[in-house]
Amino acid sequence: MVAMVPARTMDKQKPAATMTSTKNETPEHSTASFGFREVPADEKQGMVRDIFDSVAVRYDLMNDLMSFGVHRLWKAAFLDWLRPRPDTTLLDIGGGTGDIAFRFLEQGGRDVTVCDINMEMLTVGQNRVIDQGITLKPDQHLRWVCGNAESLPFDDNSADAFTIAFCIRNVTHIDQALREARRVLRPGGRFMCLEFSQVILPILDRIYDTYSFQVLPALGEFIAQDREAYRYLAESIRRFPNQEAFTAMIFDAGFSQVSYRNLSGGIAAMHSAWRI
């Protein structure tokens, strides 16, 4: 059933966070990072929505450009680590185009809800079901929900697994999104995040920086006619907490057994945690 609903790998002790807050302590003057700029916190959500409205129909191409096409292998590794089971109820946040949801169902999962703040992205995902001839088994359920990662439209203790791929760096308050993830997970539920991260190989980091800030925006202008969107995406990756700092944030949100695995020398990383 398909439905649209409106609206380094080891367990470790909590590390010290190395990132400072991107917002001011005074609520009425709070700011958030938008790429390398600081903008009023209450404006970031709309600015990010505009970016993804612009790139929605070319989102898969965008990921190909940003990851050299390797994002497909990363997502496969992500689902392999999740190990979907038929009795797993999954919430996939920021997954509007359906990549994670479709893989989850292909690997034996039966119940997944895709939640994205951007209707354009959700439309792309729903169209893919039709265009790619994706057929669900009678006992499989796929729902599409428009919602905010910082204020999810789901009940407490309502999911067995929570995934968020290439999304969390774009939310205004990452700490709040992490708390929401814990809230909607049942005790024993698993949180997993796939995100661009900090390159750990000295030579690769210089090559990737050159590509991200010189080549990628030019490709964005040529292919998608949107240089600024691609520049923002590159900048947002550099502003996102590194592997250890993000691990600390997940601990602070109340999760346990937090671990991560680097992918492609740290260009991306997978984080896993449990609600105990």
Image (tube, grey):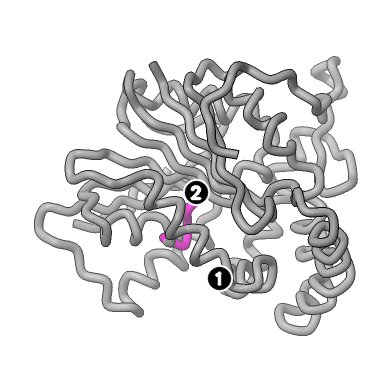
State the image coordinates of residue 39 (x, y, percent, origin top left): 86, 39
Q: Secondary structure at mark 2?
A: strand
Give the mark toward the camera: 2 or 1: 1
Q: Give the vertical position of 205 relative to 60 (above or below).
A: above
**Is the Cβ of the residue at disc 2 closer than 8 Å to that at disc 1?**
no
71, 259: nearer the viewer: 259
Q: How many marks do you count on the picture? A: 2
Task: Please determine whether, in this image, residue 238 is positioned above or below residue 102.
Answer: above
Look at label 2 and name its amino acid: Asp
Instruction: Provide residue 189's location: percent of width, then percent of height.
Output: 35, 27
| Residue that carries the numbered disc 1 in the rendered image | 60
Q: Within the magenta stretch, is there residue 69?
A: no
Q: Earlier in the sequence, mark 2 or mark 1?
A: 1
Residue designated by label 2: 116
Q: Is residue 14 left or right of residue 165?
A: right
Query: In the image, what residue type sits under mark 1?
Result: Asp
Residue 1 on image: x %, y %: 18, 56
Q: Is residue 275 left or right of residue 14?
A: left
Q: Write the start and end of the magenta stretch as one range.
A: 94-98
Left or right of 90? Residue 275 is: right
Looking at the image, which residue is at 35% across and 60% down? 103
Principal secondary structure, stretch drawn in magenta: loop
Q: Residue at x 77, y 40 (%)?
A: 43
Which residue: 36% across, 36% down? 161
Distance CA(mark 2)–CA(mark 1): 16 Å
Q: Quadrant of residue 187?
A: top left
